[in-house]
Image (tube, coloured by chain):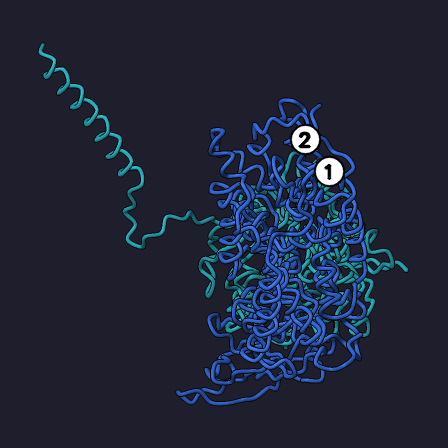
Chain colours: A cyan, B blue
């Protein structure tokens, strides 16, 4: 074989290898989707699956001590083991929306968050994550509300939104089909527990259980207000939580959802637990002295069959302690 | 250990300390760290604020701990402490120079007089009322360049150095200046320190009576000029020994073959030059240049006495005239702001206000209870408020006032429900209130809307409404400087 022939074959070999690599890369990155996007879309799981529905669907506990009231309310539904199994990764979603101290009633009480984290730990949860994508700066919100410290002390982990992989979430709602949000952590979790607080809201009337899920979504959510009752009902339908505990230890009656003055807050000293988000919202509306039928999102959700606004029909267990 | 090694240990320590403080200057990491520490020890800013506003603010008194020892020892600060000097040494080491080239690179040049002209012109403008010297102050330069250059890189790598998306409209200018300073070392080692640094020039002037310094034993000197090869200050250790240029790197002592150089008492027989070789007439001209330039700079900038639409200052900022005299343009407030609303001005405050902080509500909003910017400000251009003072119910600190653009606001212009602005308004009672109206749409259908308005008595100009407005590109509610607290004589 002549030297020039060998050189030629060497070149041919290299060119062919490069050609194969280049074609492989082209095929690897090729996208046939005519929309051009290649982002994965998270289908929200039903976080209740494999769990039996509790025998008692709702409980209401009047108690001075909010943490104790959480224990009693969950116990009344049959205990935490009904909702969290050993080895579960639990995601708790309190309202950490604003950088206000807890006494201003704009966020869930830290002792309620701590009580819930402890219950999950007791049930044998492998991970207990607490997250929210707040309106104000997230680090400040978790610090000033006391929820960050309370979570860590009770054995949970604070997940700041900037540390979560955000991605598209399929909500399959009437208005919200897909939206960007904290997809990473929602996909990892086996259980989802809502921990809203009870607040006034100018446009929506109230913001409690269903609207609390707003904190899982990101960018562009400021356009929700143009069709707010439908969006809130969409959220209620999309997030099938394993359990919801409503923190009514304080209610923000005016100037919501931010508050800002202690005179806007009333100590209502009540905790409610259950699975029917519409019933819990209706109950909270009454706690604030409002009629559920005057809250457009409750009416919308009721019509769609997401739950019942007649919370008394669920025959909740009511515990009175003073 | 050679004296050079000891110096490198010092330089590394101060560079790491500077970067540590800059990195931790963030919500949640700051934990009471004196993040502006280096600025307190900066005699240039100290003298500048005394010239401009007749005040030496708070901890800036510590600058005496650098200025007074310099009177005795010379520019030890440049060689041993300055973090920008350390970075310059580091970059300078990247270029290997053969002996002859090294001697040429470290020889004195006329260019090195420039720093004295710069210093005098900037001090003259400070005396007339603007602290423009912050533009070239080494700590300010490094703070701006590092936080807006390396910061976004770290953020990209997943380190949470900012608690907001890194977005800095003036970042590229700050980074270019720092890059130019560092790249200058490839031409001449420590080009910045030798030729341009106004702090170096000031310390050089303070060195003129230094009773201690490098001394040469004329008897043992063989004029081999090995000392020049490694002289970091281009101070002519083989010749006239320029006290104003020597930064006490001590390389000459380490390298002198007959060990004829030492650190000791000065002022005897050695030929030495105690004042910069800049001609007095040119020094007078540079003062004149500063004096002549200042009225032009001020008169071509927005009016100082009135609120200006885009010149919105951080909460607690002093009235504009005092602010311009105090602000070091260091960018510590920009680096520390948790939402990114504080940005270095490009043209918002005119030429005089270049690189001063302004509120850019397209990048964020002011957190209701946050007061960090005032606490990291070294010169007190932004007052260190408490959250209670800032949010006082009857007399809050007002950044400005929000105005609706009814031609763009959805409930006003498009008959669509919205009022996100009202939802996020943090004051109680809310500054944004809504009126319920029932109207008919184009098909005659009745719709009920909440139409928002601003109550100027309650609005503090935090801009969270503007930040949250769904009309993204030109929000339908915008903050302007009207009503800012600092316009009045008394803020606290």
Whole-percent x and y of residue A258? 70, 69
Mark 1 and mark 2 residues within 8 Å of each other at the beta carbon: yes
* Disc 1 to disc 2, C-alpha distance: 9 Å
Do the residues at discs 1 and 2 belong to one chain?
yes
Name the subunit of mark 2.
Answer: B
Camera sees residue B372: yes
Whole-percent x and y of residue B252? 64, 31
Q: Which quadrant of the figure contains the N terminus of chain B?
A: top right
- The answer to whether A71 is drawn above or below residue B99 in the figure is below
Dividing the picture into quadrants, the one containing residue A315 is: bottom right
B344 or A225, nearer to the observer:
B344
The residue lying at 51 percent from left, 80 percent from top is B409
Which disc, if any, is residue B269? 1
Dividing the picture into quadrants, the one containing residue A24 is: top left
Q: Which residue is tagged 2?
A: B218
Few, some or many residues within 10 Å of mark 2 (<14, 14–19, 20+):
some
**Circle 1 sits in a helix, a strand or a loop, which is it?**
loop
- The answer to whether A322 is drawn above or below residue A55 in the figure is below
Whole-percent x and y of residue A158? 68, 46
Whole-percent x and y of residue A294? 63, 77
Camera sees residue A107: no
* Residue ranking furthest to the right: A322
């Amino acid at each position: 074989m002549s030297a020039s022939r060998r050189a030629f074959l060497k070149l041919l070999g290299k060119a062919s290898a490069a050609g194969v690599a280049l074609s492989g890369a082209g095929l690897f990155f090729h996208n046939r989707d005519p929309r051009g996007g290649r982002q994965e879309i998270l289908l929200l799981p039903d976080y209740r699956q494999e769990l039996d529905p509790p025998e008692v669907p709702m409980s209401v506990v009047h108690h001075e001590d909010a943490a104790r009231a959480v224990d009693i309310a969950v116990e009344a539904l049959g205990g935490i083991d009904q909702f969290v199994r050993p080895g579960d990764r639990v995601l708790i979603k309190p309202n950490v929306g604003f950088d206000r101290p807890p006494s201003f009633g704009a966020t869930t009480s830290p002792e309620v968050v701590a009580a819930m984290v402890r219950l999950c730990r007791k049930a044998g949860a492998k991970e207990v994550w607490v997250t929210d994508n707040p309106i104000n700066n997230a680090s400040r919100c978790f610090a000033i509300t006391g929820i960050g410290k309370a979570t860590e002390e009770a054995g949970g982990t604070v997940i700041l939104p900037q540390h979560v992989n955000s991605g598209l979430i399929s909500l399959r709602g009437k208005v919200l089909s897909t939206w960007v949000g904290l997809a990473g952590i929602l996909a990892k979790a086996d259980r989802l527990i809502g921990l809203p607080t009870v607040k006034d809201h100018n446009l929506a009337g109230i913001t409690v259980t269903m609207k609390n899920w707003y904190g899982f979504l990101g960018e562009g959510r400021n356009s929700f207000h143009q069709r707010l009752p439908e969006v809130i009902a969409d959220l209620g339908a999309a997030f099938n939580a394993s359990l919801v505990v409503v923190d009514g230890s304080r209610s923000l009656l005016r100037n919501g959802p931010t508050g800002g003055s202690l005179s806007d807050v009333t100590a209502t000293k009540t905790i409610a637990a259950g699975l029917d988000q519409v019933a819990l919202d209706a109950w909270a509306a009454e706690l604030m002295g409002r009629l559920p039928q005057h809250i457009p999102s409750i009416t919308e959700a009721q019509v769609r069959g997401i739950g019942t606004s007649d919370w008394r029909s669920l025959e909740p267990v009511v515990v009175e302690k003073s | 250990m050679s004296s050079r090694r000891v110096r490198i240990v010092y330089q590394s320590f101060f560079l790491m300390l500077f970067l540590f403080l800059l990195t931790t200057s963030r919500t949640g990491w700051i934990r009471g760290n004196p993040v502006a520490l280096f600025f307190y020890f900066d005699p240039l800013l100290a003298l500048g604020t005394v010239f401009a506003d007749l005040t030496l603010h708070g901890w800036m008194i510590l600058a005496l701990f650098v200025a007074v020892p310099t009177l005795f020892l010379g520019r030890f600060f440049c060689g041993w402490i300055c973090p920008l000097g350390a970075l310059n040494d580091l970059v300078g080491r990247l270029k290997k120079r053969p002996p002859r080239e090294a001697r040429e690179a470290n020889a004195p040049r006329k260019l090195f007089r420039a720093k004295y002209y710069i210093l005098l012109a900037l001090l003259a403008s400070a005396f007339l009322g603007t602290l423009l010297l912050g533009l070239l102050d080494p700590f300010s330069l490094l703070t701006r360049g590092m936080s807006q250059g390396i910061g976004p890189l770290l953020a990209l790598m997943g380190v949470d150095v900012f608690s907001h998306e890194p977005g800095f409209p003036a970042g590229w200018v700050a980074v270019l200046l720092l890059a130019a300073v560092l790249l200058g070392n490839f031409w001449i080692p420590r080009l910045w320190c030798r030729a341009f640094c106004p702090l170096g020039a000031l310390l050089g002037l303070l060195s003129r009576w230094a009773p201690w310094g490098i001394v040469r034993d004329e008897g043992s000197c063989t004029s081999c000029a090995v000392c020049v090869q490694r002289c970091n200050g281009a101070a002519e250790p083989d010749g006239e020994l320029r006290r104003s240029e020597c930064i006490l790197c001590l390389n000459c002592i380490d390298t002198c073959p007959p060990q004829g150089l030492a650190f000791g008492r000065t002022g005897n027989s050695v030929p030495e030059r105690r004042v910069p070789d800049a001609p007095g007439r040119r020094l007078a001209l540079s003062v004149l240049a500063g004096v002549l330039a200042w009225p032009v700079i001020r008169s071509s900038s927005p009016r100082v006495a009135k609120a200006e639409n885009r010149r919105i200052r951080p909460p607690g900022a002093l009235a504009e005239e005092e602010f311009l005299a105090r602000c070091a343009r260091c960018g510590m407030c920009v680096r520390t702001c948790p939402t990114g609303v504080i940005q270095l001005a490009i043209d918002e405050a005119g030429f005089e206000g270049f690189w001063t902080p302004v509120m850019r509500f397209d990048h964020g909003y002011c957190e209701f209870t946050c007061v960090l910017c005032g606490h990291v400000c070294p010169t007190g251009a932004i007052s260190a408020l408490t959250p209670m003072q800032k949010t006082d119910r009857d007399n809050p600190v007002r950044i400005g006032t929000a105005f609706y653009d009814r031609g763009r606001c959805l409930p006003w212009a498009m008959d669509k429900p919205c009022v996100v602005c009202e939802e996020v308004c943090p004051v109680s009672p809310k500054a944004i209130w809504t009126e319920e109206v029932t109207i008919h749409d184009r098909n005659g259908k009745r719709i009920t809307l909440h139409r928002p308005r601003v109550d100027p008595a309650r609005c503090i100009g935090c801009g969270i409404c503007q930040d949250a407005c769904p009309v993204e590109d030109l929000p339908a509610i915008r903050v302007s400087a009207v009503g800012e607290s600092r316009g009045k004589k008394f803020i606290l």
